Structure formats: structure tokens, C-alpha cells
Amino acid sequence: MLNQDQINSVKETRGRILGVDFGDTRTGLAVSDTSRFLASGIGYVSPGGIEKTADKVAEVAREQSAVAVVVGLPKNMDGSEGFRAQRCREFAALLEERLEGVTVLMMDERMTTMSASRYLNETNTRGKKRKGVIDTLSAQIILQNTLDRLKNT
């Protein structure tokens, strides 16, 4: 997923990283602290359509002064990529066009939604609140996994 050049590029910069769990309905967002130790969920956007979502996420990245963005890549359990993965790659490309000079990475997000669902079950989060929280929590998990990987490489 992350190649060594991308890892080095991001490690050489200082500042926040934005985590994104792209979805057709809702796109969850998380941001790191400036020391890149902890990912925190900051909510979700749902402007409708891949182009508008890319515009809104780029706007959030600028507001957060993000120096890099990591977008979750939903691979199948066997490592292959399907329609959702291709859609996320398209989204990442659009985001990269809108954020000139900001590195846009993709990170394997297998099991993040399952981890988020398990956590929400444990905290008894139900109903409408759960729908928005799961996307934000998934973005937070994607970003935290990336931060941990950056620390350990």
C-alpha cells in the first residue's frame, strides 16, 4: 500500500495528517495531532457525488492545515480490489488534483469498519447516531493505523 518513497515523503514533513473513509453517502474524517501520535475523529461530510465530496474534503484538509491525506482503500479479504477500491482510487486522484503539494496516500482499510462496528456495539451506540459515528470512527482507525506504521518504519 504505502511505498517507501511515500513513507519517506510524509516523514520528512511536519504537520497534521487527515484521514478519510470515503463513501458514496457519508465520508468520515479524522485528523492527527501535530506530533502525529494520535488520530481524532472530526466528523463526516455528505455533500453528494464524488466531485463535491472531493471539493469538501480538500476544503477540510486546508482548514486543518494538513500536509498529507490518507484515504482508506477497501480491499477484499484475499487482497484483490473490486468496484469500491476503484471508486476510492478515483476519489484519491480527484483529491490530489485539488490539493496541489499535499501528499495523498492510500492505506488498506480491511477490517476497519468491522473494528468500528465492534467498538460501537461495545459502547452500545445505536440508531441514527451510529450511522455518522461509524464513518468517523473508521477514518480515525485508518489514520491511527497509518500513524503507527509511519512510526515503525
Image: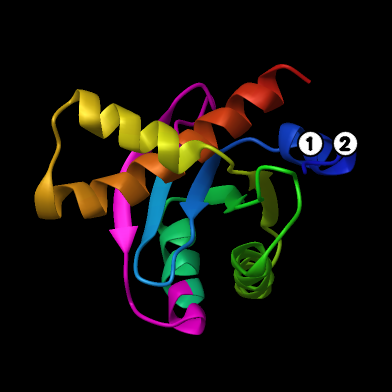
Query: Label 1 neighbourhood size at 10 Å, few (<14), some (14-19), many (20+)?
Result: some
- Residue position for label 2: 4
| Neighbours of disc 2 within 10 Å: few (<14), some (14-19), many (20+) | few
Classify 66 as above or below 47: above
The residue positioned 51% from the left and 30% from the top of the image is 144
The total number of labels drawn is: 2
Rendering coords of residue 1 (x, y %): 77, 43
What's under tag 2, amino acid-wise? Gln
Whether tag 2 and tag 1 are in contact, CB under 8 A, the answer is yes
Q: Which residues are magenta?
A: 31-53
| Vertical comparison of 93 with 70: above or below | below
Q: Whole-percent x and y of residue 5?
A: 88, 41
Residue at 50% in and 46% down: 19
In the picture, which quadrant includes the C terminus?
top right
Residue at the disc numbered 1 = 7
Disc 2, SS? helix
Q: Quadrant of residue 91?
A: bottom right
The reply to whether the magenta stretch includes residue 37 is yes
Vertically, is 145 above or below 133?
Answer: above
Percent of width and height locating residue 89: 68, 66
Question: 143 left or right of 60?
Answer: right
Considering depth in this image, is 70 or 23 the residue closer to the camera? 23
